[in-house]
Amino acid sequence: MTALSSSRATAPGQASSAPERGTDTHPSLGERAKGISRLPLSLARPARHLSLNLALTALVVAASVLSLTMGAAGLGLGDLLHAATGAGLSPRDEVVLYDIRLPRLAMGLIVGAALAVSGVLLQGLFRNPLADPGIVGVSAGAGFGAVVALVLGGLLPLGLAQALGSWLVPLAAGLGGWATTLLLYRVATTGQRTDIAIMLLAGIALSALTGAATGVLTYLADDRQLRDLTFWSMGSLAGATWTKLAAALPLMGAALILAPRLARGLNALALGEAQANHLGIDVQHLKRLAILSAAAATGAAVAASGGIGFIGLVVPHLLRQAQGPDHRRLIPHAALLGAGLLVLADLVSRTIVAPAELPIGILTALFGAPVFLWMLMNGKLRGR
Amino acid sequence: MLQIENLSVRLGRRPILQDVSLTTRAGEVLAVCGANGAGKSTLLKAVLQEHPAQGTIRLNGRDLASCRPHTLAALRAVVPQDTEIAFGFTLGEIVAMGRQAGSAAHETEIDALALAAVGLQGREGEDVRTLSGGERQRGHLARALAQVWHPVGPEGPCWLMLDEPVSSLDLGQQLKVMQLARGFADAGGGVIAVMHDLNLSAMFADRLAFLVDGHLAALGPPDSVLQEPLLSRAYDCHVALNRLPATGPWLLPQTCTLRGD
């Protein structure tokens, strides 16, 4: 075997086969051949994960502080420090801080984390880095539910419509999203086995169907409804209140707590369903939990904040390149990066054209799509 | 002990495997041989529960149908023919997956030992997608070895189940891999391997299970199974049978006959 490794090491062109991750920790190919590369590699990796952890935490903290101290109301860092040390704020500033910015920040954090972790779960499940929360039909179904509520909401009995109030659209969006996912799951499951490829194909068909139905309703909508519809589909955290947060939190929170438990199974699934089973994973159980938690989290996120794209697609990619594909680290890191990025996007969305607001979905697409294209052109999607 | 009783597999209406019964003990290397389409891989897949099958399979006395995946994972490891690995996992991470599924999950030093056993020492940082076919196959073997590192575990003997483990390997690597399998059995584990190469099977296996058209046509030591009538019937060609004192029978295909001649 020594002969094999040294022949590999000295053969011209073999240098290019050294993995990106290894190159900075392998001092030279000659040493690699002696088999001592294991040592620096095993030392470098925990250090890298620690620094990534710290960087992501710093991002979330910085984004949160910025988000609390910047905005149209002119409540600054000094006022925030006052509030933190127990000194009083003016009643107006108190309302701005506790009833507007804090719930909005909390909603941004949890929605960002939920979308990014859903992306990780679904990419792992479909063994495909191109999967995103839209793939299980949640987005299309939720969009359809929202349109139904916006356009046909007026047909509800007056008492019911008043009782639901501003809950009507989020509720309909959540129900639409979950109903679509459940239907997809049923279509793709025969006996005790869910066929992931069928799920993907059925998802395309169902998305087309709900898209067509949405189109019919859009056609029927009047001008005011059309405007509401357009803004909903572009997403916003502007409506975040503590009550809305309380309604959306349980589902997203449950999914975020459950997700790390699926990490080992998703790792094994990278070898294929049969091998994952031979590695002791109950694959059907894993699929069911991953689909349901992704659908619950995405459905609640879409219901709370409308259509916010690209977080679920881009965040897992960026992290796979930074730290490798191990889901045990990917899931917590995705929660942090998704939360930080969405809060930053929200900050930009409400300050860039202040006192007006740009819908946040426009921003995530504006930044997310070029990043995604850049990764495609660099062949990074083949990487991690 | 692996007991297979009246195993039958159908694909649609077509029977692939009919009423196969055999028993193999720990300490033995059993090679499953036969022509293309004879049902070798199907037999292994049925034992691994990848194919729905009729019949009973018992591993160390337990009925497989009632075993949970994690219970089985501590008892037997599987080397597939070849699988595409999604995302950029490293060789080290793949081997660790095997170790963590087995009964020696916390003995982290196993990873390096298993890689060294297949001649991939010092390569744990490499992305599996950059490996050659043969290296990937040995990587899967290292993962399987890490999963059943102690051939006799707390739940009795462990099993290695190999689906054409040497199909993408050169001559020297074929011998090394078969020696690993032999060593695993000699240390008290059990090995069942689907094999194309009859000469390698004769060299390393204690017994051969020879399938013809989904039936178990012969079961026994290489000398008794590798006989001219069976081979020419199975492979539709004439085979010259010889014997080496050190390794037993070896054979050379001679003339091909076309069916209907």
Image (spheres, coloured by chain):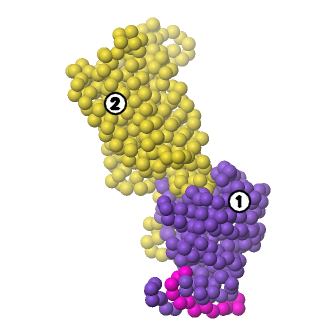
Chain colours: A yellow, B purple
Q: Which residue is mark 2?
A: A144
Q: CA distance from mark 1 to mark 2?
A: 51 Å
Q: Nearer the viewer, residue A72 or A224?
A: A224
B214 horizontally vs B148: left or right: left
Q: Secondary structure at mark 1?
A: strand
What amino acid type should be assigned to the residue bearing mark 2? Answer: Phe
Q: Residue at x 52, y 91 (%)?
A: B254
Magenta region, residue range? B234-246
Q: Is residue B248 left or right of residue B11?
A: right
Q: Position of residue B128 (x, y in %)?
A: 51, 61
Report the chain holding disc 2. A
**Residue A190 percent across, percent down from the top left:** 49, 47
- Residues packed near mark 1 inside 10 Å, few (<14), some (14 to 19) or many (20 plus): some
Q: Quadrant of the N terminus of chain A?
A: bottom right
Relative vertical location of residue A200 with respect to residue B2 in this rendering, above or below: above
Quadrant in the rendering for residue A206 = top left
Q: Please tell me whether residue B245 belongs to the stretch shown in magenta.
A: yes
Residue A381 visible in the snapshot: yes
Q: Cβ–Cβ below 8 Å for labels 1 and 2? A: no
> Is the residue A289 above or below the residue B201 in the image?
above
Say if B126 sits above or below A72 in the image: below
What residue type is disc 1 on? Arg
Answer with left or right where residue B30 lies relative to residue B40. right
Binning the other alpha carbons within 10 Å of mark 2 as few (below 14), some (14 to 19) or many (20 upward) gives many
- Could you say where residue B239 lies in the image, as x and y percent from the top left? 56, 89
Viewer-closest of B213 and A186:
B213
- Magenta stretch, main secondary structure, is strand
Label number found at residue B2: none
- Percent position (x, y) of residue A76? 42, 19
Residue ID at (34%, 15%):
A156
Q: Give the labeled residue for mark 1.
A: B58
